[in-house]
Amino acid sequence: MDLTIESLAYGGAGIARAEDGATIFVEGSCPGDVVRASITEDHGRFRKAVIDEILAPSSERVTPRCPYFGECGGCQWQHIDYGVQLQSKRRAVIDALGRIGRLKIPVRETLGSKNSYGYRNKVELSAASTPQGLVLGYSRAGSNHVLPIERCLLLPKRLERAPRSLTGALRYLSSQGDVAVERVALRVSSTGSVEVDLWTAPGPFPRHLAAKIITDAVGARTVTRVLFKGELKTRNVTKVEVLAGPGMWEERLDDHRYLVSAPSFFQVNSAAARRLQHTVTEVLAPDGTDQVIDLFAGVGTFTLPLAELAGNVIAVESSKHALADLRRNLEVNGLFAEIEPGDADRVLPGLGHADLVVVDPPRAGLAESTIASLAATGARTIAYVSCDPTTLARDAARLVGYGYRPTEAIPIDLFPQTYHIETVLVLSAD
């Protein structure tokens, strides 16, 4: 059938309408395209389709820069003008809040990334064995199979060919014996700090040789071996071995220095993370006497600036690796915050009153019991930071049931060329 693409869905596909009113999600399309497409899945009220032919390309369609685009599952929107990407991400937030949360609140224009390419401070490459030897790459679109890559344009320019260099280094290493590397994480900071983390199962490993060839290949300051058990996706880390360097990746946001260990999370776009920090502190506006709770504090992305502005900050975090980093980051920056180790659902009920709260949960959002405990703090303002508009909308609606009023949402683009969007939702006590 011939279709006109009207908009973009959260998830990446373009949206068109069938003659019977059904919604059709068309992969690889751009708003304004006229395409001939074939239905691949029919679910009644919605269908999925693939493009057979672009009959009339949209004026908003651009040429993707990456030679792997379309095969690689990492980016979905390189063929779409960046301004249109920003508009579509804002619409995704509006749609989720309205459709899922039944909320109609002001949503600001999306705050764009300083760079739409070369912005990532971290990539994670999957390793796979082939007849030609070990390869590194990303998952192919729509599958778990590894697509070998030699460069990634989302990395800073001086390191965009690092995947090729690391592949060569690990092929040589594997020729000396079975190294069982399953993932390679590459981190590069705005200060020039480069770290490579080799994720392996426990067992013999050529530590000294690995340290030398990885350092030579990409100029890494730190090389670590991250040992895990079980499935890789569970990230059940048992030990981190420092093979070379200080064992920490270093980044700076404004005047704050962050030291981050291999298993710990840090936002992948440093410039946009700085903007995210500023947005949270601005909407909370601590006055120097406020009691602030930072839930899911991680390595201290929000804890550090809030510790300078508030009367007291209580940081809650469950990861032992992030907790160690958080303590270190407070110390090296000469700041103080109370640290409460443990899961937010367990710790929060015992913290008592708070004036302000920032909560930055994983993609799954908050448990109902956590939301009840959050409301029980009596905080006058909550800044909810979310990487998933759907769970954000669900949790916002639940907080409304506890007497909170969403006042505005602020989308911030940390992930250009993809459909992902970070949002700061501001809620005030009625």
Image: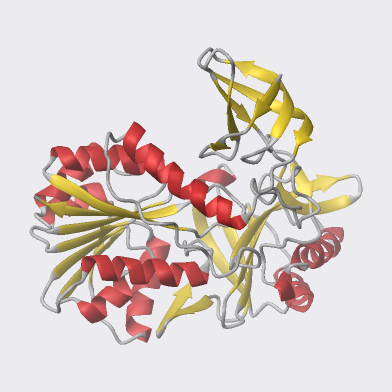
Front-lying residue, 313 or 231: 313
Q: Is residue 36 above or below residue 377?
A: above
Picture mark count: 0
Q: Is residue 121 visible?
A: yes
Q: Which residue: 29% across, 36% down?
A: 101
| Residue 250 percent across, percent down from the top left | 52, 78
Q: Is residue 336 visible?
A: no
Q: Which residue: 68% across, 19% down?
A: 39
Q: Quadrant of the N terminus?
A: top right
Quadrant position of residue 392:
top left
| Residue 54 percent across, percent down from the top left | 77, 34
| Residue 354 percent across, percent down from the top left | 12, 62
Q: Which residue: 44% across, 49% down?
A: 90
Q: Is residue 322 above or below residue 289?
A: above
Quadrant position of residue 28:
top right
Front-lying residue, 122 or 379: 379
Q: How is the image coloured?
A: secondary structure
- Residue sitting farthest toward the right: 132
Quadrant position of residue 17:
top right
| Residue 196 percent across, percent down from the top left | 65, 68
Q: Is residue 94 above or below residue 123?
A: above
Q: Which residue: 19% across, 43% down?
A: 399
Front-lying residue, 60 or 144: 60
Left or right of 104 in this view: 89: right
